């Protein structure tokens, strides 16, 4: 899952990023409303965590503008305000949920899962393609009797490929969803990790291949 955090308290923003990383979510941070709107308009995020009291543009205006532009990404508003009128205003602007600071890690993660389900995401324990099984809780890739633990980026790439078996995943999509919007990573970083995954498929003796579509991206091949 790829999450955008729009929060002007830098320490809190960094803490949120670390919490999300423990759940194997990728995360981009921005610190004012105008940047938050620009990032959110890209449509690449699964969930947006949005503070209300922001420099340049407040959270109410950000979510109102997103909805007017038909960006349907789930938004959870984060704020120190606890007035009912503010909660009602946020929801009326188009937010999906509202979380008052301070909040617990468990509650934050539960609300992220909840708004994801509302959007139609099916929360699975594993993904399967041909003779491969990817365990989403422990990052293990298995084939018949053999299995191997994947590193974080290997896991995210394989998850994207296995979740979209009929689609070609471009290098740009991989860079954004695995490395993050602000990363300096380039095409060769993707190529290196694809090479790592191919070696692991060979170790597993899988019939699945990660095929390259020249100048476009990658997709999985194998007997389903």
Image (cartoon, rainbow, N blue to C red):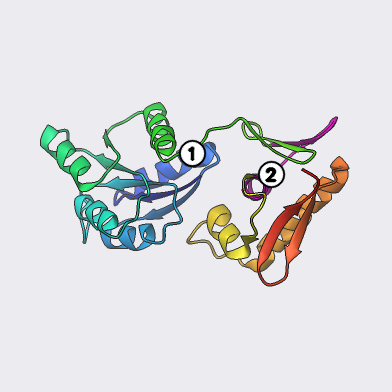
Q: Nearer the viewer, residue 92 or 135?
A: 92
Identify residue for label 2.
151
Q: Is residue 160 magenta?
A: yes
Of tags 2 and 1, the one toward the viewer is: 1
**Range of residues picked out in magenta:** 140-162
In screen coordinates, is 90 left or right of 172?
Answer: left
Query: In the rendered structure, are the residues bearing label 2 and label 1 in contact, judged by CB atoms less than 8 Å apart?
Result: no
Residue 84 visible in the displayed image: yes
Q: CA distance from mark 2 to mark 1?
A: 24 Å
Considering the image in quadrants, where does the C terminus appear? top right
Q: Nearer the viewer, residue 7 or 25?
A: 25
Percent of width and height locating residue 170: 62, 63
- At 36% from the left edge and 60% from the top edge, which residue is drawn? 41
Instruction: Count residues near mark 1 (Cα–Cα under 10 Å), then give few for <14, some for 14-19, many for 20+.
Output: few
Q: Tell me: residue 95, above or below residue 8.
A: above
**Which badge, 2 or 1, is on the more N-terminal residue?**
1
Name which quarter of the figure residue 71 lies in: bottom left
**Judging from the image, what secondary structure is the residue with disc 2 in?**
loop
**Judging from the image, what secondary structure is the residue with disc 1 in?**
loop
In screen coordinates, is 11 left or right of 176?
Answer: left
- At 37% from the left edge and 32% from the top edge, which residue is drawn? 111
> Which label is found at residue 121?
1
């Amino acid at each position: 899952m790829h999450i955008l955090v729009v929060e002007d308290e830098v320490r809190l923003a960094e803490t949120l990023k670390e919490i999300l990383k423990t759940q194997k979510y990728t995360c981009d941070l921005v610190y004012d409303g105008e940047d938050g709107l620009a990032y959110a308009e890209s449509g690449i995020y699964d969930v947006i965590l949005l503070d209300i009291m922001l420099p340049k543009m407040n959270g109410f205006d950000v979510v109102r503008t997103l909805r007017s532009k038909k960006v349907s990404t789930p938004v959870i508003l984060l704020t120190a305000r606890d007035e009912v009128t503010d909660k009602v205003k946020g929801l009326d602007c188009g937010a999906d949920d509202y979380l008052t600071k301070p909040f617990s890690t468990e509650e934050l993660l539960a609300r992220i899962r909840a708004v994801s389900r509302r959007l139609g995401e099916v929360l699975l324990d594993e993904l399967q393609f041909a003779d491969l099984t990817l365990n989403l809780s422990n990052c293990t890739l298995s084939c018949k009797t053999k299995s191997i633990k994947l590193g974080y980026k290997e896991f995210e790439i394989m998850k994207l490929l296995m979740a979209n078996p009929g689609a070609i995943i471009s290098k740009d999509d991989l860079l954004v969803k695995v490395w993050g919007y602000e990363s300096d990573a380039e095409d060769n970083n993707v190529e290196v990790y694809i090479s790592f995954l191919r070696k692991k498929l060979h170790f597993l003796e899988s019939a699945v291949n990660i095929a390259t579509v020249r100048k476009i991206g990658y997709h999985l091949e194998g007997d389903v």
